[in-house]
Protein backbone atom coordinates (compact mmCIF):
# COMPACT_ATOMS: atom_id res chain seq x y z
CA UNK A 1 0.00 0.00 0.00
CA UNK A 2 1.30 3.42 -0.94
CA UNK A 3 2.10 5.74 1.93
CA UNK A 4 -0.75 8.17 2.43
CA UNK A 5 -3.54 5.93 1.07
CA UNK A 6 -4.61 4.78 4.55
CA UNK A 7 -4.72 8.38 5.80
CA UNK A 8 -6.73 9.41 2.75
CA UNK A 9 -9.25 6.60 3.34
CA UNK A 10 -9.51 7.52 7.01
CA UNK A 11 -10.15 11.16 6.15
CA UNK A 12 -12.83 10.22 3.61
CA UNK A 13 -14.53 7.96 6.16
CA UNK A 14 -14.59 10.78 8.73
CA UNK A 15 -16.11 13.22 6.24
CA UNK A 16 -18.77 10.64 5.28
CA UNK A 17 -19.82 10.11 8.89
CA UNK A 18 -19.89 13.86 9.49
CA UNK A 19 -22.16 14.27 6.44
CA UNK A 20 -24.39 11.45 7.71
CA UNK A 21 -24.81 13.29 11.00
CA UNK A 22 -25.93 16.36 9.05
CA UNK A 23 -28.35 14.22 7.04
CA UNK A 24 -29.84 12.75 10.22
CA UNK A 25 -30.82 16.25 11.32
CA UNK A 26 -33.51 16.32 8.61
CA UNK A 27 -35.41 13.63 10.49
CA UNK A 28 -36.56 11.54 7.52
CA UNK A 29 -38.40 8.42 8.80
CA UNK A 30 -37.15 4.88 8.24
CA UNK A 31 -38.55 3.76 4.84
CA UNK A 32 -39.10 0.16 5.87
CA UNK A 33 -37.33 -3.07 5.01
CA UNK A 34 -39.07 -3.43 1.62
CA UNK A 35 -37.85 -0.08 0.32
CA UNK A 36 -34.33 -0.46 1.66
CA UNK A 37 -34.09 -4.06 0.46
CA UNK A 38 -35.31 -3.35 -3.08
CA UNK A 39 -32.92 -0.45 -3.68
CA UNK A 40 -30.10 -2.34 -1.93
CA UNK A 41 -30.47 -5.25 -4.37
CA UNK A 42 -30.46 -2.97 -7.42
CA UNK A 43 -27.38 -1.03 -6.26
CA UNK A 44 -25.57 -4.29 -5.51
CA UNK A 45 -26.34 -5.85 -8.90
CA UNK A 46 -25.35 -2.73 -10.82
CA UNK A 47 -22.16 -2.44 -8.80
CA UNK A 48 -20.92 -5.97 -9.47
CA UNK A 49 -21.32 -5.36 -13.21
CA UNK A 50 -19.16 -2.21 -13.16
CA UNK A 51 -16.74 -1.61 -16.07
CA UNK A 52 -13.12 -0.51 -15.96
CA UNK A 53 -12.59 3.20 -16.47
CA UNK A 54 -10.86 4.55 -19.57
CA UNK A 55 -7.65 5.29 -17.72
CA UNK A 56 -7.32 1.69 -16.58
CA UNK A 57 -7.73 2.36 -12.82
CA UNK A 58 -11.03 2.24 -10.99
CA UNK A 59 -14.47 1.15 -12.10
CA UNK A 60 -17.42 2.92 -13.68
CA UNK A 61 -20.96 1.88 -12.76
CA UNK A 62 -24.58 2.93 -13.22
CA UNK A 63 -25.22 2.19 -9.55
CA UNK A 64 -25.10 5.94 -8.88
CA UNK A 65 -28.54 6.16 -10.56
CA UNK A 66 -30.04 3.82 -7.95
CA UNK A 67 -28.12 5.59 -5.17
CA UNK A 68 -29.54 8.99 -6.15
CA UNK A 69 -33.01 7.43 -6.45
CA UNK A 70 -32.67 6.07 -2.90
CA UNK A 71 -31.57 9.49 -1.69
CA UNK A 72 -34.50 11.44 -3.17
CA UNK A 73 -36.95 8.76 -1.96
CA UNK A 74 -35.68 8.22 1.58
CA UNK A 75 -33.51 11.26 2.42
CA UNK A 76 -29.75 11.71 2.91
CA UNK A 77 -29.37 9.53 6.03
CA UNK A 78 -31.12 6.43 4.72
CA UNK A 79 -29.84 7.00 1.20
CA UNK A 80 -26.31 7.16 2.57
CA UNK A 81 -26.70 3.98 4.65
CA UNK A 82 -28.27 2.20 1.70
CA UNK A 83 -25.43 3.26 -0.64
CA UNK A 84 -22.60 2.50 1.77
CA UNK A 85 -23.80 -0.96 2.79
CA UNK A 86 -24.63 -2.09 -0.77
CA UNK A 87 -21.33 -0.73 -2.12
CA UNK A 88 -19.31 -2.44 0.62
CA UNK A 89 -20.99 -5.82 0.10
CA UNK A 90 -20.54 -5.57 -3.69
CA UNK A 91 -16.85 -4.79 -3.25
CA UNK A 92 -16.37 -7.75 -0.89
CA UNK A 93 -18.30 -10.00 -3.30
CA UNK A 94 -15.98 -8.89 -6.10
CA UNK A 95 -12.99 -9.79 -3.88
CA UNK A 96 -11.65 -6.26 -3.60
CA UNK A 97 -9.07 -5.58 -0.87
CA UNK A 98 -10.69 -4.53 2.42
CA UNK A 99 -9.22 -1.02 2.38
CA UNK A 100 -10.50 -0.50 -1.16
CA UNK A 101 -13.97 -1.78 -0.25
CA UNK A 102 -14.02 0.51 2.78
CA UNK A 103 -12.94 3.54 0.78
CA UNK A 104 -15.49 2.98 -1.98
CA UNK A 105 -18.31 2.50 0.51
CA UNK A 106 -17.50 5.71 2.40
CA UNK A 107 -16.71 7.91 -0.60
CA UNK A 108 -20.00 6.97 -2.25
CA UNK A 109 -21.85 7.51 1.01
CA UNK A 110 -20.28 10.96 1.22
CA UNK A 111 -21.21 11.67 -2.40
CA UNK A 112 -24.87 10.71 -2.08
CA UNK A 113 -25.40 12.44 1.28
CA UNK A 114 -23.90 15.74 0.06
CA UNK A 115 -25.91 15.43 -3.18
CA UNK A 116 -29.24 14.97 -1.39
CA UNK A 117 -28.44 17.71 1.14
CA UNK A 118 -27.81 20.03 -1.81
CA UNK A 119 -31.06 18.89 -3.41
CA UNK A 120 -32.97 19.53 -0.18
CA UNK A 121 -31.42 22.95 0.44
CA UNK A 122 -32.44 24.05 -3.08
CA UNK A 123 -36.08 23.17 -2.38
CA UNK A 124 -36.29 19.53 -3.54
CA UNK A 125 -38.93 17.41 -1.80
CA UNK A 126 -38.29 13.98 -0.25
CA UNK A 127 -39.79 12.21 -2.08
CA UNK A 128 -40.34 14.61 -5.01
CA UNK A 129 -43.99 15.64 -5.01
CA UNK A 130 -44.20 15.67 -8.81
CA UNK A 131 -43.35 11.95 -8.88
CA UNK A 132 -46.11 10.84 -6.52
CA UNK A 133 -48.89 8.85 -8.25
CA UNK A 134 -52.13 10.79 -8.65
CA UNK A 135 -50.60 14.18 -7.78
CA UNK A 136 -51.27 16.75 -10.56
CA UNK A 137 -48.13 18.19 -12.14
CA UNK A 138 -47.38 21.87 -11.67
CA UNK A 139 -44.80 23.44 -13.94
CA UNK A 140 -43.11 25.48 -11.21
CA UNK A 141 -42.76 22.47 -8.92
CA UNK A 142 -41.34 20.32 -11.72
CA UNK A 143 -38.86 23.05 -12.73
CA UNK A 144 -37.77 23.59 -9.13
CA UNK A 145 -37.45 19.86 -8.48
CA UNK A 146 -35.47 19.20 -11.66
CA UNK A 147 -33.12 22.13 -11.03
CA UNK A 148 -32.48 21.02 -7.45
CA UNK A 149 -31.97 17.43 -8.56
CA UNK A 150 -29.49 18.29 -11.33
CA UNK A 151 -27.53 20.45 -8.90
CA UNK A 152 -27.43 17.56 -6.43
CA UNK A 153 -26.39 15.14 -9.17
CA UNK A 154 -23.52 17.41 -10.17
CA UNK A 155 -22.39 17.50 -6.54
CA UNK A 156 -22.50 13.68 -6.41
CA UNK A 157 -20.44 13.32 -9.59
CA UNK A 158 -17.86 15.91 -8.55
CA UNK A 159 -17.42 14.57 -5.01
CA UNK A 160 -17.23 11.00 -6.28
CA UNK A 161 -14.76 11.73 -9.10
CA UNK A 162 -12.58 14.03 -7.00
CA UNK A 163 -12.26 11.53 -4.13
CA UNK A 164 -11.61 8.57 -6.46
CA UNK A 165 -9.08 10.52 -8.52
CA UNK A 166 -7.33 11.51 -5.32
CA UNK A 167 -6.77 7.96 -4.10
CA UNK A 168 -5.69 6.82 -7.59
CA UNK A 169 -3.24 9.70 -7.81
CA UNK A 170 -1.71 8.82 -4.43
CA UNK A 171 -1.47 5.09 -5.18
CA UNK A 172 -0.03 5.50 -8.71
CA UNK A 173 2.11 8.60 -8.26
CA UNK A 174 0.31 10.43 -11.06
CA UNK A 175 -1.03 13.95 -10.81
CA UNK A 176 -4.62 14.34 -9.60
CA UNK A 177 -5.48 16.55 -12.55
CA UNK A 178 -4.27 13.96 -15.07
CA UNK A 179 -6.26 11.16 -13.42
CA UNK A 180 -9.43 13.25 -13.14
CA UNK A 181 -9.21 14.45 -16.73
CA UNK A 182 -8.65 10.91 -18.06
CA UNK A 183 -11.37 9.16 -16.06
CA UNK A 184 -14.02 11.84 -15.60
CA UNK A 185 -13.86 14.80 -17.94
CA UNK A 186 -14.86 12.87 -21.05
CA UNK A 187 -17.98 11.35 -19.41
CA UNK A 188 -19.01 14.25 -17.16
CA UNK A 189 -21.87 15.43 -19.40
CA UNK A 190 -22.99 11.82 -19.92
CA UNK A 191 -23.10 11.16 -16.15
CA UNK A 192 -25.11 14.31 -15.45
CA UNK A 193 -27.57 13.37 -18.20
CA UNK A 194 -27.77 9.75 -17.05
CA UNK A 195 -28.58 10.88 -13.51
CA UNK A 196 -32.06 11.88 -14.74
CA UNK A 197 -32.75 8.15 -14.85
CA UNK A 198 -32.76 8.27 -11.05
CA UNK A 199 -36.01 10.25 -11.13
CA UNK A 200 -37.54 7.66 -13.46
CA UNK A 201 -36.41 4.90 -11.12
CA UNK A 202 -37.87 6.76 -8.13
CA UNK A 203 -41.18 7.26 -9.96
CA UNK A 204 -41.30 3.55 -10.85
CA UNK A 205 -40.68 2.65 -7.20
CA UNK A 206 -43.43 4.96 -5.97
CA UNK A 207 -45.92 3.55 -8.50
CA UNK A 208 -45.27 -0.11 -7.56
CA UNK A 209 -45.12 0.77 -3.86
CA UNK A 210 -48.57 2.33 -4.14
CA UNK A 211 -49.96 -0.99 -5.39
CA UNK A 212 -49.09 -2.62 -2.07
CA UNK A 213 -48.74 -6.32 -1.28
CA UNK A 214 -46.88 -8.68 -3.57
CA UNK A 215 -47.42 -6.31 -6.49
CA UNK A 216 -44.57 -4.21 -5.15
CA UNK A 217 -42.12 -6.93 -6.23
CA UNK A 218 -42.93 -5.96 -9.81
CA UNK A 219 -40.52 -3.06 -9.26
CA UNK A 220 -37.55 -5.42 -8.98
CA UNK A 221 -38.84 -7.77 -11.71
CA UNK A 222 -39.21 -4.84 -14.14
CA UNK A 223 -35.57 -3.86 -13.62
CA UNK A 224 -34.01 -7.31 -13.95
CA UNK A 225 -33.75 -7.15 -17.80
CA UNK A 226 -31.96 -3.80 -17.53
CA UNK A 227 -29.49 -5.21 -15.02
CA UNK A 228 -28.92 -8.32 -17.17
CA UNK A 229 -28.19 -6.14 -20.22
CA UNK A 230 -25.83 -3.98 -18.15
CA UNK A 231 -24.03 -7.09 -16.91
CA UNK A 232 -23.70 -8.41 -20.46
CA UNK A 233 -22.36 -5.03 -21.56
CA UNK A 234 -19.72 -5.14 -18.84
CA UNK A 235 -18.57 -8.54 -20.10
CA UNK A 236 -18.43 -7.22 -23.66
CA UNK A 237 -16.41 -4.25 -22.42
CA UNK A 238 -13.96 -6.65 -20.80
CA UNK A 239 -13.72 -8.58 -24.05
CA UNK A 240 -13.15 -5.32 -25.96
CA UNK A 241 -10.33 -4.44 -23.58
CA UNK A 242 -8.73 -7.83 -24.20
CA UNK A 243 -8.99 -7.21 -27.94
CA UNK A 244 -7.31 -3.83 -27.46
CA UNK A 245 -4.47 -5.47 -25.54
CA UNK A 246 -4.15 -8.07 -28.29
CA UNK A 247 -4.08 -5.26 -30.81
CA UNK A 248 -1.13 -3.67 -28.98
CA UNK A 249 0.71 -6.99 -28.97
CA UNK A 250 -0.03 -7.34 -32.69
CA UNK A 251 1.52 -3.93 -33.36
CA UNK A 252 4.69 -4.95 -31.50
CA UNK A 253 4.84 -8.22 -33.41
CA UNK A 254 4.40 -6.37 -36.69
CA UNK A 255 7.32 -4.08 -35.84
CA UNK A 256 9.48 -7.06 -34.90
CA UNK A 257 8.67 -8.90 -38.15
CA UNK A 258 9.27 -5.73 -40.19
CA UNK A 259 12.73 -5.33 -38.63
CA UNK A 260 13.62 -8.98 -39.31
CA UNK A 261 12.39 -8.74 -42.87
CA UNK A 262 14.37 -5.58 -43.53
CA UNK A 263 17.51 -7.27 -42.21
CA UNK A 264 16.96 -10.26 -44.52
CA UNK A 265 16.34 -8.13 -47.62
CA UNK A 266 19.40 -5.99 -46.91
CA UNK A 267 21.54 -9.10 -46.39
CA UNK A 268 20.53 -10.50 -49.78
CA UNK A 269 21.06 -7.25 -51.67
CA UNK A 270 24.46 -6.74 -50.03
CA UNK A 271 25.65 -9.86 -51.89
CA UNK A 272 24.66 -8.52 -55.30
CA UNK A 273 25.35 -4.80 -55.87
CA UNK A 274 23.72 -4.99 -59.30
CA UNK A 275 20.31 -5.75 -57.82
CA UNK A 276 20.43 -3.41 -54.81
CA UNK A 277 16.90 -2.19 -54.17
CA UNK A 278 15.46 -4.92 -56.41
CA UNK A 279 12.93 -6.27 -53.90
CA UNK A 280 11.65 -2.79 -53.10
CA UNK A 281 11.29 -1.89 -56.77
CA UNK A 282 9.43 -5.12 -57.51
CA UNK A 283 7.14 -4.45 -54.53
CA UNK A 284 6.41 -0.92 -55.78
CA UNK A 285 5.64 -2.16 -59.31
CA UNK A 286 3.49 -5.05 -58.04
CA UNK A 287 1.52 -2.68 -55.84
CA UNK A 288 0.88 -0.32 -58.76
CA UNK A 289 -0.33 -3.14 -61.03
CA UNK A 290 -2.57 -4.56 -58.29
CA UNK A 291 -4.11 -1.13 -57.70
CA UNK A 292 -4.66 -0.65 -61.44
CA UNK A 293 -6.61 -3.92 -61.37
CA UNK A 294 -8.87 -2.39 -58.66
CA UNK A 295 -8.08 -5.11 -56.12
CA UNK A 296 -9.19 -4.44 -52.56
CA UNK A 297 -6.62 -2.70 -50.28
CA UNK A 298 -5.96 -5.82 -48.22
CA UNK A 299 -5.16 -7.89 -51.31
CA UNK A 300 -2.89 -5.10 -52.61
CA UNK A 301 -1.03 -5.04 -49.29
CA UNK A 302 -0.53 -8.83 -49.34
CA UNK A 303 0.80 -8.73 -52.92
CA UNK A 304 3.18 -5.89 -52.01
CA UNK A 305 4.47 -7.90 -49.05
CA UNK A 306 4.92 -11.09 -51.08
CA UNK A 307 6.80 -9.11 -53.73
CA UNK A 308 9.05 -7.66 -51.08
CA UNK A 309 9.84 -11.17 -49.82
CA UNK A 310 9.97 -13.08 -53.10
CA UNK A 311 13.78 -13.47 -53.06
CA UNK A 312 14.48 -13.91 -49.32
CA UNK A 313 15.50 -17.54 -49.93
CA UNK A 314 18.65 -16.26 -51.61
CA UNK A 315 20.03 -15.59 -48.14
CA UNK A 316 21.10 -19.26 -48.03
CA UNK A 317 24.83 -19.86 -48.48
CA UNK A 318 24.57 -21.81 -51.77
CA UNK A 319 23.33 -18.71 -53.57
CA UNK A 320 26.15 -16.40 -52.44
CA UNK A 321 28.65 -17.34 -55.22
CA UNK A 322 25.90 -17.26 -57.84
CA UNK A 323 24.76 -13.76 -56.84
CA UNK A 324 28.29 -12.36 -56.92
CA UNK A 325 29.25 -14.06 -60.20
CA UNK A 326 29.89 -11.78 -63.18
CA UNK A 327 28.46 -13.18 -66.36
CA UNK A 328 25.76 -15.71 -67.13
CA UNK A 329 25.16 -18.76 -64.96
CA UNK A 330 25.94 -22.28 -66.21
CA UNK A 331 23.13 -24.80 -66.59
CA UNK A 332 24.06 -26.45 -63.28
CA UNK A 333 24.23 -23.10 -61.52
CA UNK A 334 20.88 -22.12 -62.98
CA UNK A 335 19.29 -25.30 -61.60
CA UNK A 336 20.54 -24.30 -58.14
CA UNK A 337 19.26 -20.74 -58.60
CA UNK A 338 15.81 -22.04 -59.55
CA UNK A 339 15.42 -23.50 -56.05
CA UNK A 340 15.37 -20.01 -54.51
CA UNK A 341 11.57 -19.73 -54.80
CA UNK A 342 11.13 -22.86 -52.67
CA UNK A 343 13.73 -21.62 -50.18
CA UNK A 344 11.96 -18.25 -50.04
CA UNK A 345 8.60 -19.90 -49.37
CA UNK A 346 10.15 -21.98 -46.58
CA UNK A 347 11.48 -18.87 -44.87
CA UNK A 348 8.19 -17.00 -45.32
CA UNK A 349 6.37 -19.97 -43.78
CA UNK A 350 8.29 -19.48 -40.54
CA UNK A 351 6.10 -16.43 -39.91
CA UNK A 352 2.58 -17.66 -39.12
CA UNK A 353 1.00 -14.43 -40.35
CA UNK A 354 2.53 -14.98 -43.83
CA UNK A 355 1.34 -18.57 -44.22
CA UNK A 356 -1.38 -18.98 -46.81
CA UNK A 357 -1.75 -16.59 -49.73
CA UNK A 358 1.54 -14.71 -49.20
CA UNK A 359 3.53 -17.94 -48.96
CA UNK A 360 1.80 -19.24 -52.11
CA UNK A 361 2.63 -16.07 -54.05
CA UNK A 362 6.27 -16.31 -53.06
CA UNK A 363 6.57 -19.98 -54.02
CA UNK A 364 4.94 -19.55 -57.43
CA UNK A 365 6.35 -16.20 -58.59
CA UNK A 366 8.38 -17.96 -61.33
CA UNK A 367 5.53 -20.05 -62.74
CA UNK A 368 4.71 -19.34 -66.41
CA UNK A 369 1.28 -18.92 -67.98
CA UNK A 370 2.03 -21.87 -70.31
CA UNK A 371 3.05 -24.14 -67.43
CA UNK A 372 6.77 -24.24 -68.26
CA UNK A 373 7.87 -22.35 -65.16
CA UNK A 374 9.11 -23.56 -61.80
CA UNK A 375 9.03 -25.00 -59.16
CA UNK A 376 5.70 -26.84 -59.73
CA UNK A 377 4.91 -26.20 -63.39
CA UNK A 378 1.40 -24.89 -62.73
CA UNK A 379 -0.23 -22.83 -65.46
CA UNK A 380 -2.88 -20.25 -66.26
CA UNK A 381 -5.42 -19.33 -63.61
CA UNK A 382 -3.98 -22.03 -61.32
CA UNK A 383 -1.10 -19.68 -60.60
CA UNK A 384 -2.03 -17.31 -57.73
CA UNK A 385 -2.89 -13.84 -59.06
CA UNK A 386 -0.32 -12.25 -56.78
CA UNK A 387 2.39 -14.59 -58.10
CA UNK A 388 1.50 -13.63 -61.69
CA UNK A 389 1.76 -9.94 -60.79
CA UNK A 390 5.13 -10.49 -59.11
CA UNK A 391 6.33 -12.43 -62.18
CA UNK A 392 5.60 -9.43 -64.44
CA UNK A 393 7.06 -6.94 -61.96
CA UNK A 394 10.18 -9.05 -61.39
CA UNK A 395 10.77 -9.35 -65.15
CA UNK A 396 10.28 -5.62 -65.72
CA UNK A 397 12.82 -4.74 -63.03
CA UNK A 398 15.32 -7.28 -64.38
CA UNK A 399 15.06 -5.78 -67.86
CA UNK A 400 15.29 -2.16 -66.70
CA UNK A 401 18.33 -2.70 -64.46
CA UNK A 402 21.98 -2.81 -65.57
CA UNK A 403 23.51 -6.28 -65.32
CA UNK A 404 27.17 -7.39 -65.76
CA UNK A 405 26.32 -8.98 -69.11
CA UNK A 406 24.05 -6.23 -70.55
CA UNK A 407 22.77 -2.71 -70.09
CA UNK A 408 19.24 -1.84 -68.98
CA UNK A 409 16.62 -2.01 -71.73
CA UNK A 410 14.52 0.98 -72.71
CA UNK A 411 10.89 1.14 -71.68
CA UNK A 412 9.78 0.58 -75.28
CA UNK A 413 11.81 -2.64 -75.49
CA UNK A 414 10.43 -3.80 -72.16
CA UNK A 415 6.87 -3.29 -73.44
CA UNK A 416 7.74 -5.15 -76.64
CA UNK A 417 9.06 -8.11 -74.63
CA UNK A 418 5.94 -8.23 -72.45
CA UNK A 419 3.70 -8.23 -75.51
CA UNK A 420 5.89 -10.84 -77.24
CA UNK A 421 5.46 -13.29 -74.36
CA UNK A 422 1.83 -12.37 -73.62
CA UNK A 423 -0.09 -15.61 -73.07
CA UNK A 424 3.16 -17.60 -73.07
CA UNK A 425 5.15 -16.50 -70.05
CA UNK A 426 2.79 -13.83 -68.71
CA UNK A 427 -0.91 -13.57 -67.90
CA UNK A 428 -2.45 -11.80 -70.96
CA UNK A 429 -4.71 -9.60 -68.82
CA UNK A 430 -1.79 -8.50 -66.66
CA UNK A 431 0.25 -7.58 -69.70
CA UNK A 432 -2.62 -5.43 -70.99
CA UNK A 433 -2.97 -3.70 -67.61
CA UNK A 434 0.77 -3.17 -67.30
CA UNK A 435 1.48 -1.73 -70.75
CA UNK A 436 -1.43 0.68 -70.33
CA UNK A 437 -0.57 1.65 -66.76
CA UNK A 438 0.30 5.31 -66.34
CA UNK A 439 1.66 4.58 -62.86
CA UNK A 440 4.04 1.86 -64.05
CA UNK A 441 5.22 4.07 -66.91
CA UNK A 442 5.84 6.93 -64.49
CA UNK A 443 7.78 4.71 -62.08
CA UNK A 444 10.05 3.37 -64.82
CA UNK A 445 10.64 6.77 -66.43
CA UNK A 446 11.38 8.47 -63.11
CA UNK A 447 15.17 8.67 -62.87
CA UNK A 448 14.94 9.14 -59.11
CA UNK A 449 12.84 5.99 -58.60
CA UNK A 450 15.67 3.45 -58.83
CA UNK A 451 17.95 5.39 -56.49
CA UNK A 452 15.08 5.99 -54.11
CA UNK A 453 14.46 2.29 -53.58
CA UNK A 454 18.08 1.54 -52.66
CA UNK A 455 18.39 1.63 -48.90
CA UNK A 456 14.77 2.69 -48.49
CA UNK A 457 13.32 1.46 -45.16
CA UNK A 458 10.50 -1.09 -45.19
CA UNK A 459 7.50 0.78 -43.90
CA UNK A 460 4.58 -1.59 -44.06
CA UNK A 461 3.80 -5.29 -44.25
CA UNK A 462 0.46 -6.57 -45.49
CA UNK A 463 -1.26 -3.51 -44.07
CA UNK A 464 -4.11 -2.07 -46.15
CA UNK A 465 -4.29 1.68 -46.65
CA UNK A 466 -7.91 1.68 -45.48
CA UNK A 467 -7.09 -0.15 -42.25
CA UNK A 468 -9.53 0.95 -39.53
CA UNK A 469 -8.13 3.13 -36.75
CA UNK A 470 -8.86 0.37 -34.27
CA UNK A 471 -8.44 -2.99 -35.90
CA UNK A 472 -9.62 -4.69 -32.69
CA UNK A 473 -13.00 -2.94 -32.84
CA UNK A 474 -13.74 -4.49 -36.21
CA UNK A 475 -12.74 -7.99 -35.12
CA UNK A 476 -14.50 -7.54 -31.78
CA UNK A 477 -17.88 -6.64 -33.24
CA UNK A 478 -17.49 -9.21 -36.02
CA UNK A 479 -17.03 -11.80 -33.29
CA UNK A 480 -20.13 -10.61 -31.46
CA UNK A 481 -22.20 -10.75 -34.66
CA UNK A 482 -20.89 -14.22 -35.52
CA UNK A 483 -21.73 -15.48 -32.03
CA UNK A 484 -25.21 -14.01 -32.32
CA UNK A 485 -25.80 -15.66 -35.70
CA UNK A 486 -24.59 -19.03 -34.42
CA UNK A 487 -27.02 -18.88 -31.49
CA UNK A 488 -29.93 -17.75 -33.67
Image: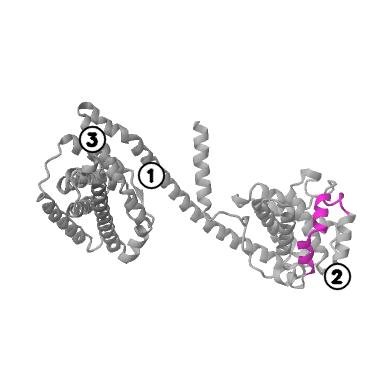
Closer to the camera in the image, 444 or 439: 439
Closer to the camera in the image, 75 or 90: 75
Q: Is residue 260 left or right of residue 176?
A: right
Q: Is residue 188 left or right of residue 323?
A: left
The residues bearing labels 3 and 2 have C-alpha atoms spaced at a distance of: 98 Å
Q: Position of residue 281 (x, y in %)?
A: 73, 64
Q: Position of residue 226 (x, y in %)?
A: 35, 38
Whether 433 is among the magenta residues is yes
- Residue matched to label 1: 234
Of badges 1 and 3, the one in the foreground is 3
Find residue 260 and report its image quarter. bottom right
At a point 20% along the width and 51% down the height, the residue shown is 116
Of badges 3 and 2, the one in the foreground is 3
Answer yes or no: is residue 94 visible.
no
**Along the polypeptide, which appears first: circle 3 or circle 2?**
3
Count neighbours of disc 1 (C-alpha within 10 A) and say few if under 14, some if 14 to 19, many if 20 or more. some
The residues bearing labels 1 and 3 have C-alpha atoms spaced at a distance of: 38 Å
| Magenta stretch bounds | 421-445
Q: Is residue 375 left or right of residue 70?
A: right
Q: Position of residue 258 (x, y in %)?
A: 60, 60
- Residue matched to label 3: 134
Image quarter (top left, top right, bottom left or bottom right) of the N terminus: bottom left
- Residue matched to label 2: 407
Amino acid sequence: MKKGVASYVLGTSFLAMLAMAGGAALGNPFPGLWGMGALFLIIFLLDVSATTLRGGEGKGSLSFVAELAGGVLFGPLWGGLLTGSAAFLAQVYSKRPLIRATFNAFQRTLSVVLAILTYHLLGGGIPPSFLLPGVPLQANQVALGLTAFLAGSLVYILVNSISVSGVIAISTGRSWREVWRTNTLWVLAYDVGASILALGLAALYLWFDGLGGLARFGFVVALIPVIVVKHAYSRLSTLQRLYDELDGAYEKLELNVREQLEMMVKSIEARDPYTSGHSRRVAALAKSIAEDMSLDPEAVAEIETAALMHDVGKIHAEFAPLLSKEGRLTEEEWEVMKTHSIKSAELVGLFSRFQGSILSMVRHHHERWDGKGYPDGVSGQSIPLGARIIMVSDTIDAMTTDRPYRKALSFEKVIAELIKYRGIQFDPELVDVTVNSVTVRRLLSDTAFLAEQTGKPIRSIARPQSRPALRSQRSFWDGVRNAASENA
